[in-house]
Every structure is written in structure tokens, then in C-alpha cells.
Amino acid sequence: MSRWEELTGGTSGEDYAARFAALAGSGRDMHGEARLCATLVPAGARVLDAGCGTGRVMIRLTELGYDCVGVDLDASMLAVARKQAPHLPWIQADLATFDPAGLHGGADFDLVVAAGNIFPLLATGTEAAVVSRLARSLRPGGLMVAGFGLDEAHLPVSPTLTLPEYDDHCAAAGLIFVDRFATWDAHPYEGGGYAVSVHRAHRG
């Protein structure tokens, strides 16, 4: 069982969506992730939203002209995503066993985005397998961007994954470090409890 399932029981989709809707209603900018993705790959690029949740990031990327597929294990989150954008491809799957080659268009994504603390909320011990699966979904030269908390102030659970461990998993999966930011608005990372990391697949 993932740490997310332990935390929520897999029934938090509507509550999660309501919380973000309230933030948006208060004037909070909710599209930093999509904006950063748009600086990494051009419109029209193929994007895999890994741990897409209720679809906030993927729906925005689609509006910006990207060809997106969303994958998440939580049926309650996907139910919200499908209600909001029934025309988009939402797939229920465990990222640790997900086979991107089985998707329409195959494993040939220009970008994988993992927002929303995906990696710290995986089942403990599956992090390397998930990085490997996501790396295999990239075309040669494709990018993976992942943002997650590193301490209890930035996570709903106790931290289990460090940046060096994440980088090691990426290297083992054939990914090359490109850049790291402190926020999805691309502020420089100078230490701290949250990081957004960009890695690139070998160009082949």
C-alpha cells in the first residue's frame, strides 16, 4: 500500500479538489507547475502526468496545447479528473508496475511531470522502480521534472526520500541531472525543504 493510501484511504478526491478550488478562488496562482513544464518542452509535446490526481496540472497543460496522458492509482482522484475533463485520457495504474509501452502512442513522451509530492507518497521501497518505469516512458532526450517535499514542513508524512537518493535512482535509470529549483516558479535551489528536479533521458 502506498503512503498516500495509508494517509487518505483512497477516498479524498472531492476534498482534495475542493481545497484547490478554494485556493484558486482566493486568487492564489495554481498553475506554476504547468508554466514550468511549458518552459521545458514546446506546445504540442507529449506529456505524461505521473500521479495526476484530480487533473489540475494536466488540464492546464492541455489548454496550453500539450498532448497529455494522466496516470494515478487513486480512483477517487481520477473520478474528479474524469468529471472535469471527460475527453482526456485518465488511466488508473500503480506507477510501480505501470507499463507505458501499453499506452496509445507507446512509451515516447517528451516530458514526464510528477508534481504533488508523488515520490514521498509512494509505497516505501518502490521509489527506484517508479523512477525506472517513468524513465522508460521517455523518448531519447526527453525530460522528467519532479517536485516534492524533503522535510515534515513540506510533507503530510515523515520524509523518507532525500535528494541524493532520488538523484541516484535517476542515474540508475539512465537519467542525467539537468537543473534543480526551489519552487515551480524556478527560483534557484539553495537548500531547503522543497525541490523541483529536472533530469534528461540519454539522447540515444
Image (cartoon, helix red, strand yellow):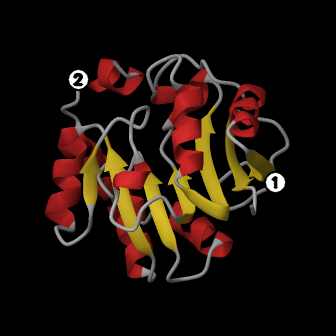
Q: Residue at x 58, y 38 (%)?
A: 131
List x then y, in percent, for residue 102: 35, 53
Q: CA distance from mark 1 to mark 2?
A: 35 Å
List x then y, in percent, for residue 194: 66, 39
List x then y, in percent, for residue 40: 66, 70
Q: Residue at x 53, y 46 (%)?
A: 134
Q: Is residue 148 above or below residue 81?
A: above
Numbered tag placed on residue 202 in the rendering: none
Quadrant of the snapshot with the C terminus: bottom right
Q: Is residue 40 left or right of residue 16?
A: right
Q: Is residue 129 above or below residue 93?
A: above
Q: Which-is-in-front pick, marks 1 and 2? A: 2
Q: Earlier in the sequence, mark 1 or mark 2?
A: 2
Q: Which secondary structure, mark 2?
A: loop
Q: Amino acid at mark 1?
A: Pro
Q: Is residue 26 visible?
A: no
Q: Amino acid at mark 2?
A: Gly
Q: Which secondary structure, mark 1?
A: loop
Neighbours of disc 1 within 10 Å: few (<14), some (14-19), many (20+): few
Q: Residue at x 16, y 67 (%)?
A: 86
**Which residue is the site of mark 2?**
9
| Residue at the outermost right position | 190
Residue 151, picture quadrant: top right
**Which residue is the site of mark 1?**
188
Q: Is residue 20 visible?
A: yes
Q: Residue at x 38, y 40 (%)?
A: 98
Quadrant of the snapshot with the N terminus: top left
Q: Is 105 or 192 nearer to us in this picture?
A: 105
Residue 178, picture quadrant: bottom right
Q: Is residue 56 left or right of residue 181?
A: left
Residue 187, picture quadrant: bottom right
Asked if marks 1 and 2 touch (Cβ < 8 Å), the reply is no
